[in-house]
Amino acid sequence: MLQINTTQNVILNFDLASVGSRIMAFVLDLILIMAYTWLVFYVYDVDSLSEIYDDHWSKTAVSIMFFLPVVVYTLLSEMLMNGQTMGKKLMKLKVIKIDGFQASSSDFIIRWFFRLVDIYGFMIMIVLVSGFSKFFGGGFFNVLLAIVLFLSPIAGFITIISSKNKQRFGDMIAGTAVVSLKNSTNISHTIIEDLNEDYKPTYPWVIKLSDNDARIIKETFITAKKNKDYRVLIKLRTKIEEVTGIENKEKNDIVFLDKIMKDYNYYTQKM
């Protein structure tokens, strides 16, 4: 269980994704990548296509063009699908910030970059060890290659099972965690607002918020309004303006926050 105490002193509980479900999501993504690779090799025949070009740089450019989607698949998926890849979506997993808000593009870039250490480190080691073996011969280096091949893939696995919030190294650096959505069916219920049929929204950029963001906003708003905690209301309004780029047009923060919740429901539930 991941317990988040937000800056507005609202405690949120998330079920952390199990190691098994994360591995399964990785395998599903890997199957998708392998299917794409098969398509490139056998449908588009990259080898024949590269023969059209005589120089090495043109052939390299063709290879990069076809295989770049494999390299950036995870990064683009998480950025475009709000913290999910197809594998995570099928397994009902999602990447979130440990402060409860939606992870940013920079967070996803950090996670993606550190896959080199967490997941692909063993591949880099294999290349290095293979290079050394050419200079120093087989024997010892072949044994070392086998050890690296066997042990390195579990580096990320060990980090996940040994860390408090089941984070791999990239998650720790980015300040993110992978949570399960399987028991989050009540999220939509907690953010629903009653709207009149003739309700006219004011802030269309509210769609930049995620369901988790909306839940945090509503829970914090209700608590702060009840306790007349205007300092928290100001912080909440400022955070929304920061995340969405919305400019407050209302006479006070309570009216603004109430309208934000109603607009969010209008654009996500009514459209």
Image: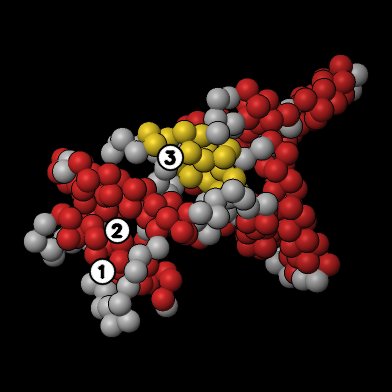
Q: How far apart are the alpha carbons under marks 2 and 3?
A: 22 Å
- Figure quadrant of the N terminus: top right
SS at circle 3: strand
Q: Which mark is residue 244?
A: 2
Position of the C terminus by quadrant: bottom left
Residue 127: % across, % down: 74, 34
Tell me where residue 35 appears, x and y as whole percent: 78, 61
Badge 2 marks a residue whose secondary structure is helix
Q: Badge 2: how crowded within 10 Å, few (<14), some, or many (20+)?
A: some
Three-letter residue code for mark 2: Thr
Q: Nearer the viewer, mark 1 or mark 2?
A: 1
Say the numbered circle drawn on residue 12.
3
Mark nearer the N terminus (3 vs 1): 3
Real-space Cα separation, disc 1 to disc 2, in angstroms: 10 Å
For label 1, the residue is 203
Image x and y of residue 149, in percent: 80, 30
Q: CA distance from mark 3 to mark 1?
A: 26 Å
Instruction: Single out the mark in the foreground, 3 or 1.
Output: 3
